[in-house]
Image (tube, rainbow, N blue to C red):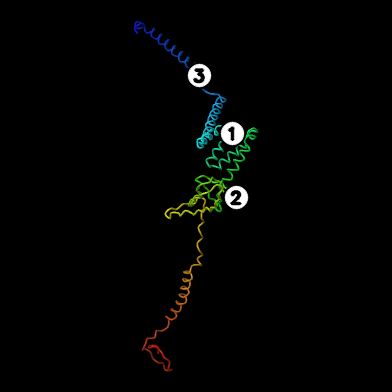
Amino acid sequence: MHRFAWSTRGGDRCRARTAATVATALSLAVALSARPAAAQTQPTPEAAQESRDAEARALFDQGVAALADERYSDALTAFSRSYEIRRVASVALNLGIALRALGRVTEARLRFNEFVEMASPAQHERHDREVATYIQDVSRRIARIHVAAVEPEGARLLIDGRRATLDANDDIATDPGEHTIEGQLQGFTGTPQRVTLEPGGRVEVRVRLAATRPDPRVTVADPNARPRTPAPPPPITSSPWLWVGIGVGVVAAIAIPTAIVLGNREPVLPGLFCFRTDGSRCATGAM
């Protein structure tokens, strides 16, 4: 601690530079030694795929164990996660089996058909007969909702809150049980319908929506409406007051000359008259 107390200022600067150089060298050594370690922690694409395949196999084994114990919900969860990683025929087959046991027959048929598409020749030879029996069973249990009418035509159909798809016969294929079907269209409203279906059953529904009653206090402009051209004013000849004015004018035109002519005649005052020598009557002062 006291060994450098007697050193000059130049010696102090030299020792400071030496210490800084040593520190820099140590930092570089640490960085260089860390690089290979960091490179080793980043897996190659092949290693990453192997890791995912191992995870998929582990999930598949969990699903098989749950299926053997008849824990179908657990089996479905494990097989679904495995299928998200690797879409292979063996997982599709076991997914179909778990879904069938849970009564989700529409999804089960989809997975069995995927197995048929993806299976290898050896898998076809081993499982085709069993899978054909499964497909026949779940197809028989699938229920159908026949949509006889949709009003208005542009309304979207929902079953249990999800978009419904109609087949060529205007049917919705669904699982047995209770379901809610409704229509949806902006500016319209309707009442959801509840139906209960037996395995293989079929019901008919009509979906009708009514226009929502607008609030009279609110005016909503239609963005698609064309601007209206104001109507031209009616012709003046169609006004009844025109003809009344013309009639008054005609009467006045006739009455004014008549009044002038009559006004030029001598006034006849009652009781003030006389007779001329020839016996004709005359006004007073006109003799």
Rendered location of residue 59, percent (x, y): 53, 31
Q: Mark 2 belongs to which amino acid?
A: Asn
Tell whether 271 sits left or right of 26: left
Pick the front one: 230 or 32: 32
- Work out whether 269 lies above or below 26: below
Residue drawn at point x = 59 percent, y = 47 percent: 167
Rendering quarter of residue 51? top right
Residues packed near mark 3 inside 10 Å, few (<14), some (14 to 19) or many (20 plus)? few
What's the distance in space between the residues labelled 2 and 3, CA to CA? Answer: 64 Å
Pick the front one: 43 or 83: 83
The residue carrying mark 2 is 169
* Secondary structure type for disc 2: loop
Residue drawn at point x = 43 percent, y = 81 percent: 262
Q: Mark 1 belongs to which amino acid?
A: Ser
Q: Which mark is first along the chain, 3 or 1?
A: 3
Q: Mark 3 belongs to which amino acid?
A: Ala
Foreground mark, 1 or 3, reads 1
The residue carrying mark 1 is 90
Foreground mark, 2 or 3, reads 2
Q: Which mark is first along the chain, 1 or 2?
A: 1
Q: Quadrant of the N terminus?
A: top left
The residue carrying mark 3 is 37
* Secondary structure type for disc 1: helix
Residues packed near mark 2 inside 10 Å, few (<14), some (14 to 19) or many (20 plus)? few
What's the distance in space between the residues labelled 1 and 3, CA to CA? Answer: 39 Å
- Work out whether 145 lies above or below 243: above
Rendered location of residue 64, percent (x, y): 54, 33
Tell whether 151 sits left or right of 279: right
